[in-house]
Amino acid sequence: MQALQIFGDRDLRLTEVAPPPPPGPGEVQVRVRAVGLNFIDVWGFRGMAFAKRKLPLTVGAEAAGEVAALGEGVEGLAVGDPVALYGAMTCGRCRACREGRDNLCEEVGGVMGFHIDGFARERVTMPARLVVRVPAGVAPEQAACAPVAFGTVQHMLFDNARLEPGETVLVHAGGSGIGTTAIKMAKAIGCTVFTTVGDDAKGEKARQLGADHVINYRTERFEGEVRRLTKRRGVDVVFEHVGAETWNGSLLCLKRGGRLVTCGSTSGVSATMNLMQLFQQQYRITGSFGCRIENIRQSLDKMAAGMSPVIDTVLPLHAFAEGLARLESRQVFGKIIATL
């Protein structure tokens, strides 16, 4: 079967690999239909895996498909069912896994497509507990956005930041996959949304998604604009995933007792901060990585109810590197999906 593998830094090749083994007890084999591209793929493409990995490695950390075969003892799924796939090889045994806090697994085997073989292949066999059935009416290209783009935002905004209806939230990079999703999810519960974008065209699209205040960070200091627009009060929540370039400005945007939740560092991994400001203003800062499996179910339910992901482009699998280049240059609005 075909798989898209990385052989070295920026060296992606569509290759022939052996098909996966038939599913064993408690396992499911999935025919992969769509793979979502994310910045974690860009990091892996650059060679920034932050851990040892064996090359060649099949890429793809986010995907959807349909059940091709079931192993013994699998319940709740049938051959032909559309499914979304959880991309961390959790143990399923530790306390965190047993309590449904999957992204805090104490014995995680790695992130698929980053540390271990991922989803950019025709078929994959994996534990049934990591496979989530997709509701009717949700297309594979949409379902492929659930594990990372939607699941990450669901976890950040509601599990971690505890965003409430009517609050104010600053969403950084409103044209990104998770940025567009965060705007939609926050507006859906009646929040006032501020967002940053890199050009006016993206700004207009962000307004169409529901953003109340759009700030072009290339022409305006976003922290000054947020302070001005809130009459120096600040926002309740900052949705941060840019990193070093925006970190201290994001803190300045928070009201006293405000919450910052972060899942990324695309502009740099190190930042300094004013500790006196931190404790005097009583900020609450939460790191967030990935999501719980339950967040994928919640995300798919939102899609089935009409909250469609913003999809920038759908590409064939062999054009994956082209999609990564567009992500790296930030020339996207929403998600890029590769189909098989």
Image (cartoon, grey):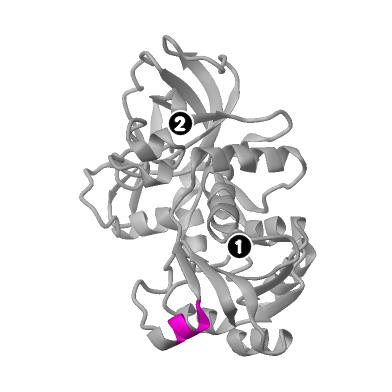
Residue 89 visible to an observer of this rendering: no
Which residue is nearer to you in this view: 239 or 80? 239
Prevailing secondary structure of the magenta residues: helix
- Above or below: residue 191 compared with residue 104: below
Which residue is nearer to you in this view: 261 or 338? 261
Q: Position of residue 7 (x, y in %)?
A: 27, 47
Are circles 2 and 1 on residues that touch, CB within 8 Å?
no
Mark 2: amino acid: Leu
- Name the residue: 59% across, 18% down: 80
- Name the residue: 73% across, 85% down: 229
Separation of disc 2 and disc 1 at Cα?
25 Å
Neighbor class of circle 2 (other Cα within 10 Å; few <14, some 14-19, many 20+) is some
> Splitting the image into 4 quarters, where does residue 133 fall?
top right
First in sequence: mark 2 or mark 1?
2
Residue 97 visible to an observer of this rendering: yes
Q: Any magenta on residue 280?
A: yes
Question: Which residue is the site of mark 1?
Answer: 179
Please give the range of residues in magenta.
Answer: 277-282
Question: Which residue is the site of mark 2?
Answer: 130
Which residue is nearer to you in this view: 10 or 61? 61
- Above or below: residue 234 compared with residue 156: below
Q: Any magenta on residue 242?
A: no
Q: Position of residue 321 (x, y in %)?
A: 44, 53
Neighbor class of circle 1 (other Cα within 10 Å; few <14, some 14-19, many 20+) is many
